[in-house]
Amino acid sequence: MRTGARGDAGSEAGSGGGTVNGAPAPPPGDARRRGALVLAAVGLLTLLMAVVGVDGLGRLSNSGFIPYDAPVRADNAELAARYRAGGADLVLLVRAASGVDSPGAAERGRELERRVARSKGVLSTASHWSAGDPALRSRDGRAALITVDLSGGDATVTRTAERLVPALTGRRGPVEVSAGGPAWVSVQGMRESRRDLLLAELIAVPLSALVLLYVFRSLVAALLPLITGLVAVAGTLAALRALMSFMDVSVYAANMAGALGFALAVDYGLFVVTRFREERAAGAGLEEAVARGVRTAGRAVVVSACVVALSLCALFVFPFGFLHSVAWAGIAVVLLSAAATVVLVPVLLTMCGRHIDRWDLFHRLRRRPRGRGGPDLRTGPQGGPDTRTGPRGGAAVRTGPRAGEGLVWRRVAQVVCRRPIPCAAAAAALLALLVLPFGHAAFGPSDARILPADREPHRVAREIERDFAHPVERQVTVGLPGAVSHGALDRYARRVAALPGAAEARTTTGRYRGDEHVPPAAGDVRAEGRPARPLVQVTSREQPYAESSRRLVRAIRALPAAAAPAGSSAAEDSSASSGRSLVTGEAARAVDTADALRRALPLCCALAAAVTLMLLAWFTRSLLIPVKAVLVAAVSLTACLGCLVFVFQDGHLRALTGDFTVTGRLDGCVVLLVLIVAYGLSVDYEVFLLSRIREEYLVSGDNTAAVIHGVERTGRVITAASLIVVSAMAALATSGVTLLKVIGAGLAVGVLVDATVVRGVLVPALMTLTGRANWWLPGLRRRPRSRRGER
């Protein structure tokens, strides 16, 4: 029967015609000419998209990590407008070997501050020399700080810092100046990420090529998914450039989208090419094999892309510009990857499909399977050839592309289906072990330590923490509503200094430590009259992301500002009537970020689950399978999160990920991004597995046989697809920026666990246990066997 099938294909090629599903097929020459035109158009478009996209890399930002509706954002803007004060966006560390109070160093320090204050985009400055604040002078007197508040939003602040710092730092006479602070961290992180964006692609492309060459055993077959991947990357860069016209696009979104776009496009191309080769091995003609590949694997690609894209839409419920830019970039790249696959791959297969098995570069490294030269028939239940009724009632021989392909996964599936309960229990136990570290997970925004230890902002932050009694990052700035009297400000500062977690409070009436009050030096503040700037600088005892610092911020916000400073005039300030103080600082940012994530997380999970349930219910015509898919994906994600805690929070396995600074916490926004993307990829592989299981079930009506067949036919290709994603994400994990390491390593671990333990063991075991209930859907009366022979 196999010989006859090949003879039909050969006669089709020889005659220059043929039929596809009973319809006349176009002559091969016409198909090749149309294909050449399509390829030329795609090539020109890809080149144009690459040029436009690369041009836009310089416009990427590093903003959007503060919630839109965060009180700290509004308070910072109010403080800037009313009191020309706010957070320390930029910190200049001035060192002098002779001491910062020596005449030469002091004069140069004051000159530097005046120069900064006159610069465009600078709101206000403060220094040890102008403010006399001891918190701005190191313990040994050899270093001092100049804090700079910049005007504008996150992106504007970053651009201002990028312009100012190079002209301010370095050796300046008797002093050495270096820069730190959130704005300079943002600039350095953006530069690192831009370099990593191109480096990741240079690493991912050859690694993916090696995987494809080994899996396909053919250079021709391996090139087709790679071509779609490169087209998708060019399209991704162009899409990001278009997004920049409407919003700030995070540089981290570009890194993630570039790696994800390449990996998904190659994966999608891998699935379609694999199905095409199966159809050709079964005796289908070229055009028929292309049509069947697009109709089966192509349909799964479209459904999978919709699931991933709609899952990313759940990120829009979080009020973070960073997550919104990632969502838009991810949606664009997923849709582009699917479009490149369903449009470009069929054309490529039509052009070179007859040579799909040529040039195995690794043939000398492979063992020759027994019977390599004979027929490669997949045996049926009784050991004979596996022949199924074709769409028109004729015989259709279904074979694998090569002898031995899928054999390992078939044996795994057989073991799992024979003993589903022990296998499911073992898989669940392994996932439970992986999730154990999640029990002590801690979250908080990132700081300078996301950069390599030798970068200037990281080094400056470390020196400030070591040499200064009250590091700038621990400062909480409190602005009182309206004008207040000298006595009212004194009473309020005493109450703030007495709060748990407060190390010190400083204002124009002096310094307060618990019950201790140190009055200001003579002449600093008038004994009578009203202070011009009713601001209180509070220093927390611990790091700004510690729980005690967060409680301090909440206690300050709960303190009635209007009631405490008696004498405030509500007519002078609209905010006085509300009695609400204005609170800014890194600790306030940590509180608002955590609150925003906590509020939106339930809705995000509900939307992602609802999208998956609806699409999979439509795709599988089942009610139980989508529910299991959501639950299994959730279990897989918790295991991924446990691994992130173990590696990045606890600091294990740094030899595998590259060195980074352990902070004892994870960035909540980045972890959320990893989980959403990993969820989409998990369902992505679920779609391809279920498509083959359902296809077999509609032919045979045997649930167990369908599960074994689905795992056998997809196990090897899903493993290869996961290795491609891992290659792209591992390249991302080589970044010097810890945030990108977390994204790359987290997605790599999640994909590996999902493609092996979940897709290879847990899902087949559960589908075997539930049996025919898998395919039950209320109102669906049609029996599976009525569609026997559908392919």
Image (cartoon, rainbow, N blue to C red):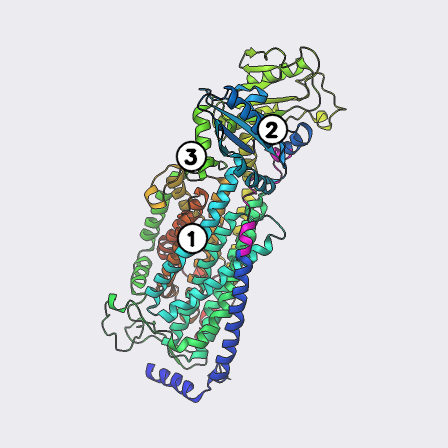
Specify whether residue 67 is painted magenta. Answer: yes
Q: Write the start and end of the magenta stretch as one range.
A: 55-74
Q: Which residue is mark 3?
A: 663
Query: Which residue appears at 67% of the width and 12% of the height?
Result: 526
Mark earlier in primary sequence (3, 2): 2
CB atoms at circles 1 and 2 under 8 Å apart?
no
Q: Position of residue 647 (x, y in %)?
A: 37, 41
Q: Amino acid at mark 3?
A: Thr
Q: Which residue is mark 1?
A: 199
Which secondary structure, mark 3? loop
Which secondary structure, mark 2? helix
Q: Observer-nearest residue: 773 or 13? A: 13
Q: Nearer the viewer, mark 1 or mark 3?
A: 1
CB atoms at circles 1 and 3 under 8 Å apart?
no
Query: Which residue appears at 32% of the width and 57% of the height?
Result: 416
Q: Nearer the viewer, mark 3 or mark 2?
A: 2
Q: Position of residue 640 (x, y in %)?
A: 41, 46
**Residues under labels 1 and 3: Cα distance?**
26 Å
- 156 lies left or right of 464: right
Q: Amino acid at mark 1?
A: Leu
Instruction: Please tell me how crowded label 2 is: few (under 14), some (14-19), or many (20+) other residues with Cα within 10 Å.
Output: few
The quarter of the picture where the C terminus appears is bottom left
Marker count (numbered): 3
Q: Position of residue 690 (x, y in %)?
A: 43, 62
- 735 lies left or right of 493: left
Query: Visible in this render: residue 713?
Result: yes
Q: Amino acid at mark 2?
A: Arg
Q: Which residue is mark 2?
A: 114
Q: Which mark is residue 770?
A: none
Q: Position of residue 94 (x, y in %)?
A: 49, 28
